[in-house]
Amino acid sequence: MFDFIRTHQRLMQFLLLLFIFPSFAFFGLEGYTRFREGDNAIAKVAGKPITQQEFDTAQREQMERFRQMFGPQFDPKMLDTPEARQNILEGLIVQRVIAAEAAERRLAVSDQALQQTILSTPGLTGPDGKFDVERYKGLLAAQGTTPTMYEARLRQELALQQVSSAVQATAFAPNTVAGRLSDLNDQEREVQEQVFKAADFVSQVKVTDDMLKAYYEKNAALFEVPEQVKAEYVVLDSAAVAAQVSVTDADIKSYYEQNAQRYTEEEQRRASHILIKAEQGASASEKAAAREKAEKLLAQLRSNPGDFAKLAKENSQDPGSAERGGDLDFFGKGMMVKSFEETAFQLKQGEISNIVESEFGFHIIQLTGIKPAQGKSLEQVKDEIAAEIKKQLAAKKYAEMAEQFSNLVYEQADSLKPAAEKLNLKIQTADGLARTPNPAAGQNQPYNHPKFLTALYSDEAIRNKRNTEAVEVAPNTLIAGRVVEHKPVTRRPFEEVQATVRERVVQAEALALARKAGEERLERLKGGADAAGFSATKTVSRVKTPAIEATALPVVMKADASKLPAYVGVELGNTGYGIYRITKVAQPAQPDAARRQNEQQQIANAIAQQEMAAYLEGLKKKAKVEIIKPFTSSPEQQGDQK
């Protein structure tokens, strides 16, 4: 990857944040005009507040999206830092300023564009390759939304994309710039290496007891045994609450009856059409010509209805359906433009409509299928309803139990037993807990969360052995703990680590001797000394697997090669010291055209992102963005400010 791209990593991360947060498709932001006033604003855009509640909602949705994307690998702590919170706030601000710009420009999305976007969404087709309406509705329902809500949000998202794409689409990478960067990337250098290995100098190292003791004292932290505690803890989470919730058959039946419409599939219709385009801006004569063509086709169909698919393939100007003989598959109400939908739902099976005018032109519609509205029986949805009721009851019960939990561990701070017995929770034990999370313990262990560990290492918890406060370590997850045993920081005795100290001292001294020998040799070579002792010539470049030490490659490729042979010295970590003799610089005989084309696109993308970032800064100034509460404090302190 180019140095140019690498130096813009922060910009890349910022634009990635815009891409994935938040996705209007399933987790959309409320409409731009629906801002709540209040005295808890954390920022203002165009005079309208972004409230703490809106931020909290966005953070929860971001966390849920990441959890779905990364599964058990997701660590909630990655979003629980001042920087992550500030990035989420930046995302909200950017959406607001783009939404304001879209509204000012009166940008809109047509029904056809919306429909095509939905139909082309990956994962929404059935085994037959056609749009699966049931899967579409099911995915939305799983996210707590409906087709109407989703389509309104998607329409808004597409309007916002018009703003960003208008800026990014203008960016391009000049051929000369792209070519020069690709030349640098492709450049090949012929080198020889001479390595002064530390291992070869070990026999020359003389170690004294004073050297060992000095190293031990100077590097005391290397030999420390970290501070540790053994703790008891109790966790209150959704699973613990749900286990205490029961749902009766009467509850399920009542819920089913009260939400009968939710379990009824609306009528769907399948139609084919022939479209003769006449855009809204078309002249009267163009519209008349289009209507005349449609009427001629209709006349043919009245005589030979069986030719509908044939005439659609030959004449329809809707590229999405023409090749399928005009077939649009099944659709429900609200998925087509108004005039088209009204006509389709009035036709009888096999009937062909008169000319129907819409914003896209003139349609001839043939109804090819009817899927009547039908409801699901109680037995079919019993498990689904039971899970939903249990979820709702558990959410309500969690709020009640969370308050009890917090009060009990605070008011009866000498033991976790009262809280555990009252709320039917289990007291667990964890040993070897340090002040910072242990990667080996697992990211999702409540006791391994930094906020809990901070509470556990408080003076009150360690000195007085009192319960910690209830700490929220994840959504709907509280933990409280109590220190059973505390082990302060200790240092392993010198006698115990003497062998390790000797190894380290010998290695350090050998490296120093290797570096000294290498540097002296480098100076002689630069002065014109004989180049004996170098390896055979190797060809290296930035795009090939390194034929020399990986740490040396960037130094070799950046070295001044205006005068050959050129020499450069590189420290090779614990290996020793390397000298590299550059004898030739050239371009490959056959450059990789595909890779160079890809590199040019990468440069264009980087330029587009840079221009978009500058454009967003301009929009933020125009909207007079004001950050009222920047997230510069720790998450705990930020919580105190709410």
Image (cartoon, rainbow, N blue to C red):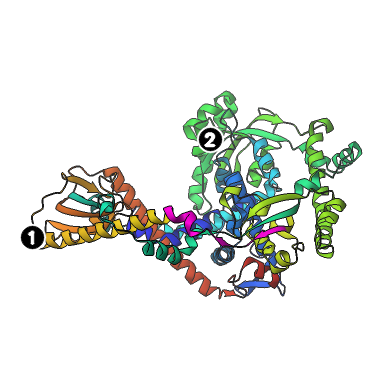
Q: In this view, does 227 lie to the left or right of 277?
A: right
Magenta-colored stretch includes residue 485: yes
Note whether 325 is above or below 156 in the view shown. Answer: above
Which quarter of the figure has residue 562? bottom left
Q: Which amino acid does label 1 sit on?
A: Gly
Magenta-colored stretch includes residue 636: no
Q: Name the residue under label 1.
A: 528
Q: Is residue 561 left or right of residue 378?
A: left
Q: Position of residue 232 (x, y in %)?
A: 74, 54
**Boundaries of the magenta span:** 484-499
Which residue shows up at 55% across the image and 39% down it?
A: 122
Q: What element carries label 1?
A: loop
Q: Which amino acid does label 2 sit on?
A: Ser
Q: How crowded is mark 2: few (under 14 residues within 10 Å), some or many (20 or more)?
A: some
Which quarter of the figure has residue 89? bottom right
Q: Earlier in the sequence, mark 1 or mark 2?
A: 2
Q: Mark 2 points at which residue?
A: 321
* Residue furthest right in the image: 250
Camera sees residue 172: no
